[in-house]
Amino acid sequence: MISLDGLGYQNLTQNAVTRREMKTLHRLAKRGFVAPLQTTFPSKTAAGHAALFTGAWGSVNGIYSNTNPRPGYALADTISGYRSESLAADPIWTTASSQGISSVVYQATQMYPFSERSTGKAVTINGYQSWTIAPARVISAKDLKSSSEWVDGPLRFTIQREPQGLRVGFGTQTVLVRHVPTETKGPRNRELARHFSAPLPVEANGIRTAVYFRLFEYSPTDFLLYRTPAQEAAAQGLTFDLATETGPFVPNSATSLYTRSAFGKLIHEGGDGTAERRYLETFELVVRQETRQMLALNRHFNPRLFIGYYPVVDDMEHTWYGLSATGFKAIDPYRAWAFAALDEGLAQLTAPFANRRDAIVFASDHGMSANTHEIRMPVLLKQLGFDPETVVPNATCFFLNTTRWKQGTLDPAATSTLLRSLEEKLAATGYFTRFYSAAEMSARYGHKGQASPELCFDLKPGYYFSESARATEAVLQYPHPRGEHGFDPLRPEMQSFVLVSGITPRKQLMARQVDVAPTVAELLQIAPAATTQGVSLLHTRSATSPSPYTPPVP
């Protein structure tokens, strides 16, 4: 079972670029089926993955959004939804391993910090929530402390010039980073990320890892050098040195550096595409390393259940999907490059199973929509006369800071009056298309209990939401359109997907994220977790099918 973060059903099945390049998924779907999934509300990464992995909605699994309020605490005292502390239901790998199913889990959400609930007896690896020694960097000659020394936080590198490029050292070890011009053609029929250096081991505060380098420019007086993050990859039950065999874990592509023009002028700001191609080499590296590591884990452990994760679509489409969807088609060749690189990785990853009777499951957490504006909810609330500490926005929902929360100030008896006023004033702004009451959210999306919102909403197309209060204006226009998510999960562009290869179930129009884990349990012939709210996709379950999305009336 592999998660492809950020790849929505609409993008996979209807976008011309994605349909053309994601050949492996379309080939696998011919041996089974692909269907849209109703995701969580809000359609956020942490909550969507929790629903996929546990088969339960947030009121049961404890993960409501990317940040979560916690019963017994102050409403403002939230915790990351990506970490395991809030996990209140067993994920599929814990359920499977407790029933004697050998399981390996690579980079799934809600594993770390490791606990009996979040890992069970599975072999687990997570580098996204563990310690970052130093983030990714792009440096030039001017960034050096001296002509031969580069100090980056707790890391101290030596740099020496050689005819072929730079020799970078840490401690007693060095690697030669050769200067090779930036790739000009896509990733088909060649090795991914082929011009990165060998890994250089680094260590700080007792944590050992390694980093890669890419030298994009090199002259007698200057250079442009990219270094991957120095990131710990925590593991439980690992019995061999994964990094020595495959190279280090690389958590994500260099999107933030790219958007800050560290690789050169962006194409939608007048660049010639060099910055995009440099970014795509970092994208390829993530695909290469994650594929290598998942294949090595499968070789060593040969588990009955393997869970894996790729972050790269979400990372890339936040930056490029909005441009493409609003008419800037010059970005599509670069999107095609990215999807081709991912497809190459998926082809390698699934090759060992091609002639076996294994079931291969792909799923995602949410889709993407194109957005040109952002509404900063705390600023808007203040302009409308509401106290942002009493009405607290969290993604596409509002929590009221009643006395049920520690340090809460609002009398629960006053909530109905406040909610009516809130809905009326927000509707009058023209940005909000629909509101969802607590009762509706409970029935359809599993919002129940104290840690659930009082009111949720959807926005008119093109408008995103923000919990930031750092602005004087409530509505800001983006410099360039962005891809975003978090809206009503029944919007077609928000729906995620499930693909099952190796079985042919009944015809089905749409499923729910909570149906994926019980489907995997049935494929493994084990009992689903007691907390499971979904139903296996191998059975008719019309009574639990989601309702079709109804667009708001203008």
Image (cartoon, rainbow, N blue to C red):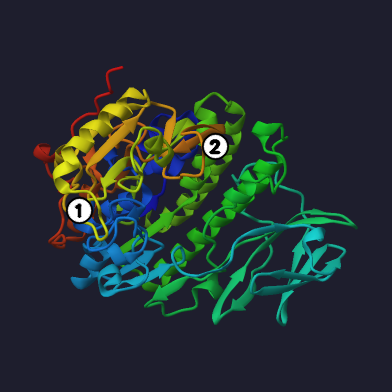
Position of 29 with respect to 286 (left or right) is: left
Measured as percent of width and height from the top left, residue 317 is found at 50, 40
Measured as percent of width and height from the top left, residue 108 is found at 37, 60
Name the outermost residue toward the left: 543
Residue hosting label 2: 320
Q: Is residue 56 visible?
A: no
Please, what is the three-letter code of the amino acid marked with disc 2? Trp
Q: Residue at x 54, y 40 (%)?
A: 319
- Dividing the picture into quadrants, the one containing residue 336 is top right
Measured as percent of width and height from the top left, residue 302 is found at 35, 69
- The residue closer to the viewer here, 195 or 231, is 231
- Dividing the picture into quadrants, the one containing residue 35 is top left
Q: Residue at x 37, y 54 (%)?
A: 2
Dot 1: what SS? helix
Q: Residue at x 30, y 74 (%)?
A: 115
Dot 2: what SS? helix
The quadrant of the picture occupied by the N terminus is bottom left
The quadrant of the picture occupied by the C terminus is top left
Q: Is residue 376 visible?
A: yes
Name the outermost residue toward the top: 554
Residue hosting label 1: 59
Position above or below: 368 against 364: above
Please, what is the three-letter code of the amino acid marked with disc 1? Ser
- The residue closer to the viewer here, 100 or 236, is 236
Position above or below: 272 against 400: above
- The residue closer to the viewer here, 87 or 215, is 87
Measured as percent of width and height from the top left, residue 306 is found at 34, 62
Pick whichever of labels 2 and 1 is earlier in the sequence. 1
Position above or below: 119 against 552: below
Position of 292 with respect to 449 (left or right) is: right
